[in-house]
């Protein structure tokens, strides 16, 4: 089962893409994928793509948001788009941390969309996905080494989130466990919303990733995953707009 968790877990929201942190591409992202969004008293309001109100549990503090751009960067993409921006979006980051800024949990909402100058769409099947509010969300969990992935892909959203938090003085473990919800944000399938609930693996379970994968009973691993999912579902609500 533990291996299945890793197989089922996501690698990134779009295969073969990575974010560009260059100043020029960040400005392009702001211009190409900009809509009105705000956070007040842990209520995240998005005016469009999608139009939604997300109430984040009060145990989290809002830290801030940043824009990003996704560049086609593998042979999954046609040669004519390699190295070019294909999507953009923004991340809203919340954290639960102690007085020394050691992070226990993160809550992240990502709004993302393919640019209007291409015909790419999100191909996920939502026929069996559950409704949260008035939108269907696919769900999965992932237990992984965030620091290692950040080192391997320093410009992707996860790596940039680590930098974003560390520059503000927050301290993160290397290894996370994640519960993730993915929904479409437009009828044409060019936009999506992703809700991430993350916990520091060692702090939450007492186990390293290697121990979790290889040393604990299957039943205990399943119990940890089930409890993670339950906590993630209690961490936010979708409110009427």
Image (cartoon, rainbow, N blue to C red):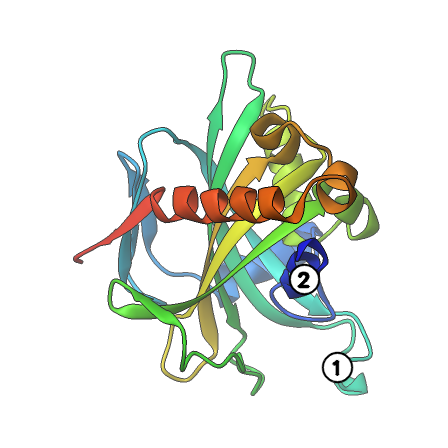
Q: Which numbered tag is attached to residue 4?
A: 2
Q: Residue at x 33, y 43 (%)?
A: 234
Mark 1 vs mark 2: which is more N-terminal?
Answer: 2
The answer to which of 233 and 69 lies nearer the viewer is 233
The image quadrant that residue 136 belongs to is bottom left
**Structural crowding at the residue carrying mark 2, measured as other residues with C-alpha within 10 Å and reported as few (<14), some (14–19) or many (≥20):** few
Looking at the rendered structure, which numbered label has been put on residue 77?
1
Residue 57 in percent (x, y) is at 32, 37
User: In front: mark 1 or mark 2?
Assistant: 2
Extreme residue in the top direction: 99
User: Is 139 on the left-hand or right-hand side of 55?
Assistant: right
Q: Is residue 202 left or right of residue 88?
A: right
Q: Give the residue drawn at x 45%, y 49%.
A: 229
Position of residue 64 measured from the top left corner of the image (x, y, whole percent): 46, 37
Residue in front for this viewpoint, 38 or 176? 176
Q: Where is residue 128 shown, x and y percent of the image? A: 41, 78
In this view, the residue farthest toward the left is 240
Q: Nearer the viewer, residue 116 or 208?
A: 208
Q: Nearer the viewer, residue 112 or 85?
A: 112
Q: Quadrant of residue 212?
A: top right
Q: Is residue 92 visible?
A: no
Residue 29 seen anywhere in this rendered image of the structure? yes
In contact (CB < 8 Å): disc 1 and disc 2:
no
Q: Is residue 228 above or below residue 141?
A: above
Q: Is residue 211 above or below residue 123?
A: above
Quarter assignment of residue 148: top right
Q: Residue at x 43, y 61 (%)?
A: 34
The CA span between labels 1 and 2 is 27 Å
* Label 2 residue SS: helix
Residue 118 in the image: x percent, y percent?
58, 84
């Amino acid at each position: 089962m533990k291996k299945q968790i890793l197989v089922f877990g996501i690698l990134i929201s779009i295969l073969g893409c990575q974010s560009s942190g260059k100043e020029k591409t960040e400005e392009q992202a702001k211009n190409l994928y900009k809509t009105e969004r705000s956070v007040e008293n842990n209520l995240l309001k998005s005016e469009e793509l999608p139009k939604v109100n997300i109430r984040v549990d009060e145990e989290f503090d809002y830290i801030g948001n940043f824009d990003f751009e996704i560049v086609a960067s593998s042979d999954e993409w046609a040669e004519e788009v390699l190295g070019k921006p294909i999507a953009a979006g923004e991340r809203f980051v919340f954290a639960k941390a102690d007085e020394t800024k050691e992070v226990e949990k993160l809550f992240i909402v990502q709004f993302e969309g393919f640019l209007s100058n291409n015909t790419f769409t999100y191909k996920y099947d939502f026929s069996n996905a559950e409704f949260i509010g008035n939108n269907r969300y696919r769900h999965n969990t992932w237990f992984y080494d965030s620091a290692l992935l950040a080192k391997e892909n320093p410009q992707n959203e996860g790596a940039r989130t680590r930098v974003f938090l560390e520059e503000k003085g927050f301290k993160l473990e290397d290894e996370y466990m994640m519960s993730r919800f993915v929904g479409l944000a437009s009828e044409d399938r060019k936009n999506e919303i992703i809700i991430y609930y993350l916990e520091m693996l060692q702090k939450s379970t007492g186990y390293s990733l290697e121990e979790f994968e290889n040393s604990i009973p299957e039943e205990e691993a399943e119990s940890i995953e089930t409890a993670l999912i339950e906590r993630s579902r209690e961490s936010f609500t979708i409110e009427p707009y």
